[in-house]
Amino acid sequence: MFRQLSLKIKLTIIFVLIFGSSLIAFSIFLYQSVSDAYQSEFDLALHNFAVEVGDSIDLSLLGYVSIDRRVFEEDRKIFPFSLNEALIEVRSIGGTPMAKTRSLGDRDLPFERSKVSNLEKGYLIEDWNPETLFGAYRSYRVIHYAIRRVGFSRFVLQIAVPTQMVTIHQRKIATIFTYSVAALIIGSSLLGFYFSHLALEPIRKMISKAQSIKVEDLSARIPTPNSKDELNDLAVTLNGLLERMERAFQSQERFVSDASHQLKTPLAILKGELELLEPTPQVHSLQEEVDHLIKLVNDLLVLARVDTGASALNFEPVQLDEIVMSAVERLNRFAIQKGIHLLVNFTPELQEGQMETLRVRGDHDLLVSLFETLIENAIKYSPEKSTVCVEMARGPTIRILDQGPGLDENEKSQLFARFHRGKKAKGSTTGSGLGLAIAARISELHSARLELLNRSSGGLEVLFQMTPIS
């Protein structure tokens, strides 16, 4: 799934994962540090509170404990703790209760002799979660504070205060970090997507330029970034590849064109010499082979021309019906030799004088070559005493219908490949396999639609459509 994503999305995801995980880890560390700082501050305040209360306790010579009652006035606060929320109890070092606040009732604060009897630092602070509530609080922080008076044994002051204040602060901090981290991750995602878009902009320009380069115009080059980095190296490498391709295509086109021109003259001479010889089966066979070679040379010349692209063509307004009729007239003799009836039909709207819908912009000679190829193929592959029908309709749309063997459905993807001849064509007629390739290329240069379809009644339908001149 990840491999199918675009590079921009991948870079954004990687950036967010790295930044987000680092931010979350740092936020957890910072939250724990702040939380520990609050806890330490709370414990310090609790210790100061215990010292203040401890200083208010008096011990008589007989060992009785008395506490200054003014310390427990409900409206009076010592440090951040309210006396009406604090639970206070005084015990002997052995754990015997000596005095406590009324809010404790008959209950006592937690006391473990093993912990309290040996207070190295003079006090001990721990958490306490009573099973039953004292007021509205469930969580307390308890300090065990050792008090010593001259002439008296040591005793322990226990004070429990609710931890609500620390809990509220911790929740606020957690909320702040949660929303802040979420907002930063979302913001970083958008920024990461934006900056990855900017970083990949030169690559998109290269792709756009590369897609616009056609075979007929390999002189175009990909823009090279000013920066001396990998993108610059990529552009230079691609331009070098285009330069080598351009030289190779030019060499191929020159070879095809030059070879075709050089072959036309000796073939014409050879054809003339054969016509002077006494007609025999051998001479007739040689004439057919020479005609085949002449047709192949002409096809190669046309192919060399169309491979140069639209820039080398002569586009002008032409009447498509005139081009089709010209091709029909030139091939009518060939059809008669095979005993085939070559028929031309116009749709009713054309018969009513809407011939202007057949006016297109194109290269006259190439369009004539295209229709000669298509009609000649229809005649070649049609049985004797059959009909080849050329229909013209608005659009303009040209249909060439024959009664031949049709197409093998498994070969449709290779129909327009150069030098390819279908299985049904092999052995029945001669050909070079360039005709449909040239026709497809001419159609492409004219932005036309060329399609071959099997007819339900048998035979083949060739469909050609172009855009008329508006």
Image (tube, rainbow, N blue to C red):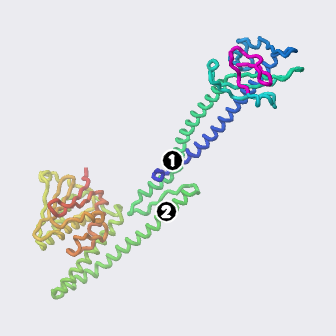
- Identified at 70% across, 19% down, the residue is 86
Give me the disc on residue 38. Answer: none
Q: Is residue 92 above or below residue 285?
A: above
Image coordinates for residue 29, horizontal then vertical, percent: 66, 38
Q: Is residue 171 above or below residue 204?
A: above
Closer to the camera in the image, 83 or 361: 83
Question: Horizontally, is 245 left or right of 306 in the view?
Answer: right
Instruction: Give the foreground label among 2 and 1.
Output: 1
> Which amino acid type corresponds to the residue marked 1 in the rendered image?
His
Q: For mark 2, what is the residue?
A: 239
Q: Which residues are magenta?
A: 87-111
Sequence order check: which comes first, mark 2 or mark 1? 1
Question: Horizontally, is 2 left or right of 137 in the view?
Answer: left
> Which amino acid type corresponds to the residue marked 2 in the rendered image?
Asn
- Identified at 28% across, 78% down, the residue is 264
Report crowding for label 1: few under 14, some 14 to 19, many 20 or more residues within 10 A (C-alpha).
some
Q: Is residue 97 above or below residue 36?
A: above
**Residue 107 drawn in magenta:** yes
Image coordinates for residue 134, horizontal then vertical, percent: 64, 19
Q: For mark 1, what is the residue?
A: 197
Closer to the camera in the image, 365 or 423: 423
Q: Does residue 53 appear anywhere in the picture?
A: yes
Secondary structure beneath disc 1?
helix
Report, in whole angstroms, how far the alpha carbon at label 2 lies from the one at label 1.
24 Å
Q: Quadrant of residue 169?
A: top right
Q: Quadrant of residue 116?
A: top right
Secondary structure beneath disc 2?
helix
**Residue 67 drawn in magenta:** no
Image coordinates for residue 355, horizontal then vertical, percent: 17, 53
Q: Does residue 322 appear anywhere in the picture?
A: no
Image coordinates for residue 265, horizontal then vertical, percent: 28, 80
Report crowding for label 2: few under 14, some 14 to 19, many 20 or more residues within 10 A (C-alpha).
some
